[in-house]
Amino acid sequence: QVQLRESGGGLVQPGGSLRLSCAASGIIFSINTMAWYRQAPGNQRELVAAITMGVGPSYADSVKGRFTISRDNAKNTVYLEMNSLKPEDTAVYLCNVGGVRRFWYSANAEYWGKGTLVTVSS
């Protein structure tokens, strides 16, 4: 199995910054896509940002210019740098990895983290 461990959430004032991290552990040969989703109370889960091998990052329109996603392939870790945070960014942020191959011959698999809460409030 592959486990995802998220960290970095918390309470921040509007205009502030946070950095989320998600480390994948276990037997991993490769990970194609690493992404962050978020879900606010009463809302559907939405894709915030994703980064795919050989393609680069993509962002939801609501976070473009404020959030930056990056990955460290040697550490199987994805980061989300969040700046100029707004109250509407308040949500549980969930890490997702897709196209995961545990061995070179393995089929692709997808995994989710449990989430980390980000609260933007004064």
Image (tube, grey):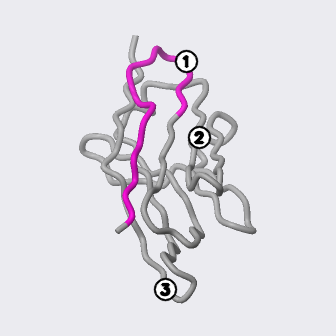
Q: Amino acid at mark 1?
A: Gly
Q: Nearer the viewer, residue 106 or 82?
A: 106
Closest to the camera, between mark 2 and mark 3, is 3
Residue 74, horizontal then vertical, whole percent: 65, 55
Circles 1 and 3: CB distance less than 8 Å? no
Q: Which residue is mark 2?
A: 63
Residue ID at (55%, 18%)? 16
Furthest residue toward left: 42
Furthest residue toward front: 27
Q: Residues within 10 Å of mark 3 (few under 14, many from 20)?
A: few
Q: Which mark is residue 106?
A: 3
Q: Earlier in the sequence, mark 1 or mark 3?
A: 1
Residue ID at (48%, 49%)? 23
In the displayed structure, 14 sits above or below 60; it is above
Closest to the camera, between mark 1 and mark 2, is 1
Furthest residue toward bottom: 105
Residue ID at (48%, 55%)? 47
Q: Nearer the viewer, residue 81 or 86?
A: 81
Q: Which residue is mark 1?
A: 16
Magenta residues (range): 2-19
Q: Amino acid at mark 3?
A: Ser
Q: Is residue 17 magenta?
A: yes
Mark 2 lies on a secondary structure that is loop
Mark 3 lies on a secondary structure that is loop
Residue 118, horizontal then vertical, whole percent: 39, 31
Residue 108, horizontal then vertical, whole percent: 48, 81
In the displayed structure, 82 sits above or below 110; it is above
Q: Is residue 8 magenta?
A: yes
Furthest residue toward top: 122
- 41 on left or right of 116: left
Q: Quarter of the image containing the C terminus?
A: top left
